[in-house]
């Protein structure tokens, strides 16, 4: 690692997001792993817990440590990724920020800016409304400037990313009726996390598809927050997530009504071109093109397509992403790159 | 086979629907297999082509024969299931009916009653508008009396069954705004048929989910036809099918608006109870229950659940079925049972 | 249920074997479910725990009860299937036998006849060497007469069934060198049971294959016991199980050396024909035929094929079965049929 | 691309090996894509055929061209990877070598050095025995020096790599009885190639495992060739490949007898340490460790473990690899790195 490397900590690395973060950071040319924490794996070499990364030079000799703020600070880390459960992250965020360490939080603890909405969707009062307000919602395609300056980035949820990327430009442009939006998403099983739960066993998820969590999945709160900001008015949408038998990937289908009567073809494509022409990770496939999760797994890409359903007047949008990639870990690294003045694509040009 | 057995032909048995028909007919106590046809497999013993049914007494000595109307008639068949491609079935249907053989057609050739809609969705003029009008749309939960008397039953498509079963009672009762309906379905790969197509290879479908066929999938025509009849006015809906990596199963999610303002809980459950209280194959799981395809694969069941999304005023319906079961072959046998005066569940009480 | 029905209990029905037993017993024409027990599900209706069987007439009103010997006896049950963990079954077996209830045990508690081997493979002394000796190893193709008279049947393990069915006739006939046997089996994830174990999550098993448990998997003990009996001398073999991403199915490949130099083709086929010509559930596909798990899942079939590797002098055998079917639950019902004087195939002719 | 980049052609890029080669070459820091050929896709932009790589800078403007030797030479390519079917590669190899272009052939055309064995396993006379003799078998762990100097590298097959890597050091050291070897391998469906074959459809491969190709799979010829060289005597082994429902990955289990009586533990580990201590892509997990395909997919790693079965005197070896990675495309790039004086790991340190 060169003298210009950035010492970085991963806090809570035993779940799927943490594991994917580690995997990607191994291949990041500027990151130096200062500390990797896991309460349950403390003391074990990383490669014993994650056989996939065995032998990587960057983790030679590295063991999981207990998640302790002072210990992390003592490693000289300048940045910490938090891959902790919701409700646990904020304590570490606050403590690490006090030590001068910039924080990228993959949990939901700082994604909302309204304490009342937080209480409604997550229960209880938020312990730190100030940090909640300070945190930048880490969707780099829309908040790059704020992310560059942020001390605390709240990296978006997996479903929200797949929904907001296709919708935000159109809602901002006033092309779709925001309150007409209904979303059906299907997600791979890694999205449910690495927890010992019999309903997530292979024999339960295989040859099975099922909706769950409707009508008020927690991710709805951040989706509506961002759509409302874009629309300039309160937006409420319908959202149904489904669990399907793939390891990774989210495929999102969005029904919405357009605001005008004229044929929209040109408008949709032009709006996307303006929004994403320079975005390295959003690939606009075009009208009547259907994106496929298998073309984005393991990457930081979101692929977008759409159809205009002239018989009903609806516009139908499609997006795919890797729920652990652009939906979690690689998107967090995209923010990291911005925060540390690196090219946005550093370490992320995977195919 | 007793003297009361019903000699039956399966025409076009080499695809997935035909294969599933055969499998189910082996376990049907009254069916005697008179003829099983396949142009490509003619002359081969059934068990060589379908190793799963090897050894079954009912197919001992039985070989595939060429699909020939006279040959089928010569076997003394009283009923023929047609599992042929769209556009091929109608010739056999016409010929077999002339011979006095009742026909259950699993293709789309007779599902529509308006030649103009047929031409719009399938291309070209329908060769037999008279038979088109005569054919009964074989959804036994709604057409049992007509099916009992029918010479020609057009068994519904897989997506249509999964969409019509949850919707028809509510549309008939005027509880939902028919033109507000938007449907997202995910289907297993057997729905695409047993054709040598590289895009359906295991390595293409596995770890992949993708929309296709929107906004004007052919099945839309029969869905809208039946919804329009139920609503008493023309209905147009949005429909997006998806392909996912399971062998069998369709999971359908339906967004719609209700017609009234009052809380609907009671109304939905009561309407379903009235419609399906005596229906042996429709299982109404209830509000806030999410059906799972793995509980219906290999059966003739449709499971239904729903949520009321009070934040947006929408009603969201869920259904699951086996696309080769209630979506094709076992539903066709359900019609057969009605046509031959048998209990509707004969040979179909699988779990 | 007719007056001739046989009242039957399923003890420990919440795991995959118990669930499959219930499913199959629903379709068994003579079985009346007297009691279904589960410590963790006691008090819940069966259909709530197993949505797949919802609506089945045979379980109407039936709830899980605590596993209590007196309570089971009070139901008038004449037979009990035990689908309990190893080490737990023997207590129930002893108690139920005392009440005059015949027992079919799906656990390993009574499969061995040598207490020393039990201690070596399962640890600790067997609590009831007498019952151990009395129990009949429930492989109906080889022990039908003893099973008919048995009070206590020890139904074989999944791997052992897939290995013994192809091997026993050849070992008995002296055609293969018993100590040359090396076996590689791959099993679906349901074989590991329905336990909340993070290593069995969908995202861990999917896109993964791995050996485990070698060289001394517990099932080796019963395999070697039965091979030794057949060979008339002590036999030790090598056995490697693997976990693969299917829900159900075992595919076993057996390498062995033949005892003679002559071409064996005729001998292998003839020996199988003699052994299995009248066996309704063993399908001998023939030389150079490769059985496929997908043709036996959900059934009680074992399919067998083989190749003669003349370049090395080895014989290679192949078998497939459903690990929950012939490998567990349907095989137990096959014993039940024999014990109660029914045709061996009653309720088991599934395809 | 810097002036030091190496212009490289991929000939026959529409199959799975070619597709994986392209994907990996995109991330290779020194490779410049000079030409990518495909008879069936000629004229189409690469990203249209492979949506996964859409947007990659290295393929901007690049279209598939016809596979023409002069056209390839005209691009200034210094090296060509051939991902063509067996029997087609040799013509291109000969023509390209004449143009001074070094060739890495992923087909089987040059893997054997004995024309008689070629004729026995592939049929017909080899058209170029001279090139057959000149070609270097591209297993970099054993032939690095020859590969560095080679004009023509015959990159090994997928099964052979997974079998030779664990066996060669032990056979060379005389620790195992070479003629006692019996191998069972399970492979993902991508190994069968991207051909429209109904037996490889998702619905045929999913929930299915089956042996095939035994006892004389074509890959046996190169396995035995290399084992014979290592043993210093003719070696014949038994080999059974299986197809399983994963996209990528081979899991190989090898039964063999040891040559001595003493406990071997130390010897196996020491021999592997000596052979692979400096090999960046072979990870020796150790005794009683079971490698898992999911930890090597997408990489150039082979992971190895073993157990000593003292009850039978056998040694059982385990290996896993990605059949498209170390089993094909990334291994070919490993040879490329050696041929062009690059660090062996260039562009291949994926996790």
Image (spheres, coloured by chain):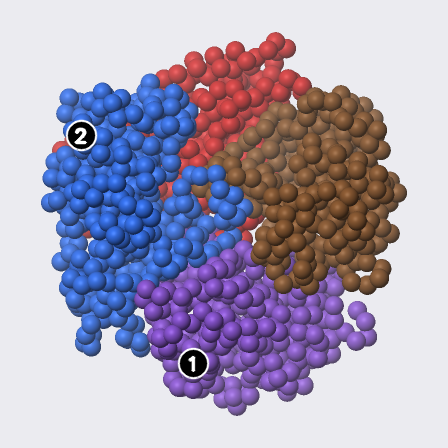
Chain colours: A blue, B purple, C brown, D red
Residue placed most toward the observer, D43 or B97: B97
Residue C349, by quadrant, is: bottom right
Q: Is residue A146 above or below residue B26?
A: above
Q: Do discs 1 and 2 belong to a common subunit? A: no
Q: Residue at x 55, y 79 (%)?
A: B142
Q: Is residue C73 above or below residue A40?
A: below
| Left or right: D164 as drawn, with respect to A279 | right
| Left or right: C55 as drawn, with respect to A12 | right
Q: Residue at x 55, y 13 (%)?
A: D265
Residue placed most toward the observer, D115 or B51: B51
Observer able to see residue C272 = no
Query: What numbered label is drawn on residue C275?
Result: none
What residue is shown with label 2?
Answer: A98
Residue A19, by quadrant, is: top left
> Which is in the foreground here, disc 1 or disc 2?
2
User: Which secondary structure lies at badge 2?
Assistant: helix
Observer able to see residue A108 = yes
What residue is shown with label 1?
Answer: B174
Q: Is residue B260 above or below residue A268?
A: below
Quadrant holding the N terminus of chain B: bottom right
Identify the subunit bearing mark 1: B
| Label 2: few (<14), some (14–19) or many (≥20) C-alpha neighbours in 10 Å | few
Q: Residue at x 67, y 70 (%)?
A: B345
Q: Residue at x 79, y 38 (%)?
A: C95
């Amino acid at each position: 690692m060169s003298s210009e490397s950035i010492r970085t900590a991963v806090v809570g690395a035993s779940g799927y997001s943490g594991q994917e973060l580690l995997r990607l950071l191994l291949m990041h040319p500027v990151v130096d792993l200062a500390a990797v924490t896991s309460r349950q794996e403390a003391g074990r070499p990383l490669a014993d817990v994650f056989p996939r990364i065995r032998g990587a030079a960057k983790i030679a000799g590295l063991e999981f440590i207990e998640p302790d703020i002072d210990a992390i600070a003592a490693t000289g880390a300048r940045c910490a990724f938090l891959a902790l459960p919701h409700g646990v992250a904020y304590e570490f965020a606050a403590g690490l920020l006090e030590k001068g360490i910039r924080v990228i939080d993959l949990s939901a603890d700082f994604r909302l800016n309204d304490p009342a909405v937080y209480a409604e969707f997550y229960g209880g009062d938020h312990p730190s409304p100030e940090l909640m307000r300070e945190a930048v919602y880490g969707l780099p395609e829309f908040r790059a400037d704020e992310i560059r300056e942020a001390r605390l980035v709240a990296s978006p949820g997996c479903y929200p990313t797949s929904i907001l990327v296709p919708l935000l430009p159109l809602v901002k442009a006033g092309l779709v009726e925001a309150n007409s939006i209904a979303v059906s998403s299907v997600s791979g099983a890694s999205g449910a996390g690495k927890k010992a739960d019999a309903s997530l066993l292979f024999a339960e998820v295989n040859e099975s598809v099922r909706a769950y969590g409707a009508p008020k999945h927690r991710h709805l709160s951040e989706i509506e927050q961002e759509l409302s900001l874009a629309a300039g008015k309160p937006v409420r949408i319908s959202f149904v997530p489904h669990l399907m038998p793939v390891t990774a990937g989210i495929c999102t289908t969005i029904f919405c009504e357009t605001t005008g009567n004229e044929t929209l073809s040109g408008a949709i494509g032009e709006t996307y071109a303006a929004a994403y022409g320079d975005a390295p990770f959003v690939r606009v496939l075009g009208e009547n093109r259907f994106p496929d999760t298998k073309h984005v797994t393991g990457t930081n890409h979101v692929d977008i397509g759409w159809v205009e359903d002239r018989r009903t007047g609806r516009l139908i949008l499609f997006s795919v992403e890797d729920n652990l990639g652009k939906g979690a870990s690689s998107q967090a690294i995209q923010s990291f790159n911005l925060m540390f003045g690196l090219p946005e694509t550093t370490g992320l040009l995977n195919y």
